[in-house]
């Protein structure tokens, strides 16, 4: 079975920050794959815009090199590369001045889908929005894509929303979180709402607890100055983990469209209970054989910024009352892994003699590195000697289950950019959703700053601080092992 490719309408996509790392690593290689898949109409164009004094040929050469460096097997298609870069153009632009805007206005068409990707720092969002409007480049149907971080607290997020709202309405703004473009993340909704097997069990009567883990093996070297002003809470929890929490916990939307889905996600955020200080564990990695300590990477020997955070929270609604949600994320951990784990309750009584400790059914949804899911079920251990029970996985790794069917699992950026062109906002954050997340996050940050809490040290290559283990041990539970 070959994946069905649905072409989009003809478009002009302007990438502000078109020479930057994100554009070269993700955005352009992803668009190249969509081009090869036949999803990009022949008369569509991609226009890079940045400070660099390049001409169109120089930019095409840069992107050809980027595809060679960051592309997959498809980069060997030399004709495909040549045909793709022929659709690229470039304009040197001054985001805060007037340089380049007239040239950009002459390039961008008004009779096709217009999309403007702000692959720049948030401090430039307002300048770009203002000049697109001033020079009459954008229209009432234009779409803008903005990258995180979308603010660093509620006040700055509200200011950014207000700035963008001066020139674009909410239906035109696409706040991108690449986690939401992952195949498995979208399968959360398919598993929950497309299978009668799970939805009746998706509540506090049958679920014991839920764990969400996003673990990374890399440190913050090279971006320490930025990260030290952010930390794991702002960098990961407020957006990535919050979105995963919403998708796993939200009520069924009335229909599968952007506002219906985002309405339900917003209800989850607003129902989150405040977290007690003893239900939060913050950590910093120490130096190890593979690299320096966090404070050395951040070049701040007195830093109190967390490279790891774990927490326990609850959702105050009828479905989830009493069910703890455990969240953790960190740098320089033992493996790179993102996983959502739903641990179901036991029957309460075992009918099997000698089997007092019942195995719990566990649904694990793996987001990276190997997208897929498995369900732990209890069976009889083969062989004579009575009824001995063991837990075994029913495993579905996408690469294994679909690999021999030639089904393409697209990169998150590919899918999300095509959704922008289609005008589908389902997998993008709405302004009130972002603000609600900050409204919940800010008091937690203010609390530990007021207490002058010092992050716990943990060994690089470990599972995090020992205190995070106690977060679950106190409840008679334990974290799932972090495995790549």
Image (tube, grey):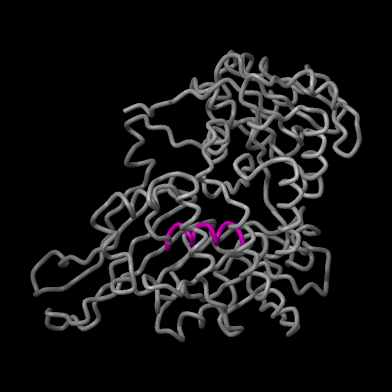
Magenta stretch: dominant SS?
A: helix
User: Magenta stretch?
Assistant: 238-249
Front residue of this view, candidates 399 and 96:
96
Name the residue: 39% across, 72% down. Answer: 320
Name the residue: 59% across, 28% down. Answer: 31
Name the residue: 57% across, 39% down. Answer: 413
Name the residue: 59% across, 76% down. Answer: 465
Q: Is residue 332 visible?
A: no
Q: Per the image, is 239 magenta?
A: yes
Q: Per the image, is 369 magenta?
A: no
Q: Indicate the quadrant containing the N terminus: top left, top right, bottom left or bottom right.
A: top left
Residue 150 versus residue 457 in the image, above or below: above
Which percent across, then down, holds residue 317? Answer: 42, 72
- Among the 4 quarters of the image, the one containing residue 235: bottom right
Tally of numbered tags: 0
Residue 288 versus residue 477 in the image, above or below: above
Residue 456 versus residue 243 in the image, above or below: below
Is residue 384 rendered to the left or right of residue 58? left
Which percent across, then down, holds residue 484? Answer: 48, 56
Front residue of this view, candidates 459 and 428:
428
Is residue 270 rendered to the left or right of residue 443? left
Which percent across, then down, holds residue 219? Answer: 68, 59
- Among the 4 quarters of the image, the one containing residue 256: top left
Front residue of this view, candidates 437 and 25:
437
Q: Is residue 323 visible?
A: yes
Which percent across, then down, holds residue 305? Answer: 73, 70
Is residue 302 rendered to the left or right of residue 251? right
- Among the 4 quarters of the image, the one containing residue 383: bottom left
């Amino acid at each position: 079975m070959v994946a069905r490719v649905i072409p989009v309408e003809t478009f002009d996509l302007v990438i502000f920050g078109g020479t930057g790392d994100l554009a070269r690593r993700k955005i352009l290689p992803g668009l190249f794959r969509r081009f090869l898949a036949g999803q990009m109409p022949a008369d569509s164009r991609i226009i890079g815009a940045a400070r660099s004094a390049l001409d169109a040929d120089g930019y095409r050469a840069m992107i050809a090199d980027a595809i060679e460096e960051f592309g997959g097997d498809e980069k060997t298609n030399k004709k495909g590369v040549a045909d793709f870069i022929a659709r690229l153009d470039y304009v040197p632009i001054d985001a805060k001045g007037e340089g380049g805007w007239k040239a950009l206005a002459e390039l961008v068409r008004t009779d096709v889908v217009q999309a403007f990707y702000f692959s720049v720092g948030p401090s430039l969002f307002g300048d770009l929005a203002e000049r697109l409007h001033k020079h009459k480049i954008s229209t009432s149907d234009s779409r803008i894509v903005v990258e995180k971080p979308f603010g660093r607290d509620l006040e700055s997020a509200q200011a950014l929303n207000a700035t963008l709202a001066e020139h674009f309405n909410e239906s035109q703004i696409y706040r991108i979180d690449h986690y939401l473009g992952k195949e498995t993340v979208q399968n959360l909704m398919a598993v929950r709402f497309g299978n009668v097997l799970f939805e009746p069990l998706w509540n506090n009567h049958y679920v014991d607890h839920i764990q969400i883990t996003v673990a990374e093996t890399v440190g913050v070297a090279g971006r320490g100055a930025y990260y030290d002003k952010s930390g794991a809470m702002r960098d990961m929890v407020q957006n990535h983990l919050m979105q995963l929490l919403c998708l796993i916990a939200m009520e069924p939307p009335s229909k599968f469209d952007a506002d219906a889905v985002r309405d339900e996600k917003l209800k989850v955020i607003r129902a989150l209970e405040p977290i007690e200080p003893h239900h939060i564990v913050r950590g910093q990695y120490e130096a190890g054989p593979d690299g320096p300590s966090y404070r050395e990477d951040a070049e701040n020997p007195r830093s109190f910024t967390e490279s790891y955070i774990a927490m326990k929270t609850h959702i105050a609604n009828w479905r989830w009352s009493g069910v703890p949600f455990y969240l953790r994320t960190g740098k320089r951990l033992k493996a790179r892994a993102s996983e959502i784990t739903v641990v179901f309750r036991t029957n309460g009584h075992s009918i099997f003699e000698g089997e007092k400790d019942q195995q719990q059914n566990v649904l694990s949804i793996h987001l990276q590195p190997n997208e897929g899911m498995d369900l732990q079920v209890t069976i009889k251990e083969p062989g004579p000697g009575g009824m001995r029970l063991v837990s075994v996985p029913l495993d579905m790794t996408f690469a294994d289950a679909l690999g021999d069917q030639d089904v393409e699992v697209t990169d998150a950026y590919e899918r999300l950019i095509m959704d922008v062109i289609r005008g589908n906002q389902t997998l993008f954050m709405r302004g009130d959703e972002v603000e609600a997340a900050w409204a919940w996050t800010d008091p937690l940050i203010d609390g530990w700053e007021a207490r002058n809490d010092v992050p716990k040290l943990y060994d690089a290559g470990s599972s995090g601080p020992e205190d995070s283990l106690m977060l679950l041990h106190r409840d008679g539970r334990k974290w799932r092992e972090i495995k790549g």
